[in-house]
């Protein structure tokens, strides 16, 4: 990953993290930058959406997702019709050569403009630089259910509405070839989840791994502020930052203290038939604290995690900076 591209993404994230910066155009623009940098991750993104798309016929006609996809944002196309031809922009286009394409119209809490989705369906493959016989489909990715009339869709390209909260866990779980991109992708999703731009249902009862994917970067900053020393997110040999699954998730933070390398491990647990818990431990050292009845909901989990980190650091003999 080039330093220049990371700078572009970091600049976009800084704007998004401003008090009123989490806008819809900035979301799709930043998503485009990150997905365009990793064609394999772009393909996984498309698969996550298609798994829950409601129109089976359109999904079957589209066919399997190719292993690599090219991502474009604000893809300009011309919507033709008997009475007029007008310029449109598709929020995201995911394509493979000239033979396969998925058009995503992404919305938060805004309505679709008049004729927006119909024009995407009517335009056809050629409008998106695809061959005339290419497999192509269109879906809407939204925070809320929208009521539409029946679209004219003779080629069965309309996949239907996909709600953000139905795919949020899978989106958090996307792994990029460059771990730096994984962190930034999760940071992007976390800002919009935290501000409930994906809808309130996007933040309830997640898996432990999803909890940590949501909270990992802010927790890193929290530890760094408290210790007054640089802290990094540590990945495993494959570069995966947050590990685990449906029952257990863990993330590790690395830093130096008194010239010694230290690793702080945070583990979120969801045991069967018992309340959730959180475990924090440090290596080297013999301090291990377990926090029982830990909250599940993402926003409450993040707040409680910061408090637990403060308790751990004080218990470990450090005087955290305020």
Image (cartoon, rainbow, N blue to C red):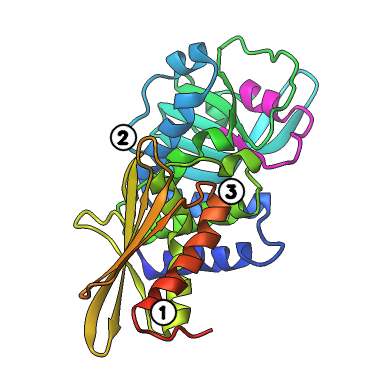
In the picture, which quadrant includes the N terminus? bottom left
Mark 2 residue element: loop
Q: Identify the residue position indicated by label 3 in the image.
A: 28
Left or right: 31 as drawn, with respect to 230: right
Name the residue: 69% across, 65% down.
Answer: 19
The image shows residue 85, relative to residue 68, as above or below, that is above
The image shows residue 140, relative to residue 208, as above or below, that is above
- Crowd band around label 3 with a 10 angstrom C-alpha radius: few (<14), some (14–19), many (20+): some
Which segment did they paint magenta?
104-122
Q: Identify the residue position indicated by label 2 in the image.
A: 67
In the picture, which quadrant includes the C terminus? bottom right
Mark 3 residue element: helix
Are the residues at dot 3 and dot 2 in contact (C-beta closer than 8 Å)? no
Left or right: 209 as drawn, with respect to 150: left
| Percent x, y of residue 51 | 44, 25
Give the foreground label among 2 and 1: 1
| Percent x, y of residue 276 | 42, 47
Name the residue: 53% across, 27% down.
Answer: 126
Name the residue: 48% across, 53% down.
Answer: 214
Q: In the rendered structure, does residue 148 fall within the stretch colored magenta?
A: no
The image shows residue 46, relative to residue 263, as above or below, that is above
Q: Could one spot residue 218 in this view of the protein?
A: no
- Marks 2/1: CA distance? 48 Å
């Amino acid at each position: 990953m080039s330093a220049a591209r990371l700078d572009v993404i970091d600049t976009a994230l800084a704007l998004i993290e401003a008090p009123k910066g989490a806008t819809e155009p900035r979301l799709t623009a930043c998503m485009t930058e990150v997905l365009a940098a990793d064609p394999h991750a772009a393909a996984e993104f498309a698969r996550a959406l298609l798994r829950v798309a409601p129109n089976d016929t359109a999904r079957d006609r589209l066919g399997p997702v190719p292993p690599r996809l090219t991502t474009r944002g604000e893809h300009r196309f011309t919507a033709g019709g008997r009475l007029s031809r007008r310029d449109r922009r598709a929020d995201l286009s995911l394509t493979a050569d000239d033979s396969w394409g998925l058009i995503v119209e992404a919305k938060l809490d805004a309505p679709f403009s008049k004729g927006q989705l119909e024009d995407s369906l009517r335009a056809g493959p050629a409008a998106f630089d695809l061959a005339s016989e290419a497999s192509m489909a269109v879906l809407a990715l939204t925070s809320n259910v929208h009521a539409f009339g029946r679209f004219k869709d003779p080629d069965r390209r309309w996949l239907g509405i996909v709600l953000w909260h139905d795919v949020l866990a899978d989106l958090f779980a996307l792994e990029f070839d460059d771990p730096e991109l994984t962190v930034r992708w999760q940071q992007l999703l976390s800002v919009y989840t935290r501000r409930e731009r994906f809808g309130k249902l996007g933040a309830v009862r997640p898996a432990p791994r999803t909890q940590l994917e949501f909270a990992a970067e802010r927790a890193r900053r929290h530890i760094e502020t408290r210790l007054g020393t640089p802290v990094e997110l540590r990945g495993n040999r494959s570069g995966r930052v947050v590990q685990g699954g449906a029952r257990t998730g863990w993330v590790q933070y690395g830093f130096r203290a008194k010239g010694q390398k230290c690793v702080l491990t945070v583990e979120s647990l969801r045991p069967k038939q018992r309340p959730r818990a959180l475990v924090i431990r440090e290596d080297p050292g013999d301090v291990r604290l377990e926090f029982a009845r830990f909250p599940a909901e993402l926003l409450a989990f993040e707040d409680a995690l910061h408090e637990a980190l403060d308790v751990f650091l004080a218990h470990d003999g450090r005087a955290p900076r305020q």
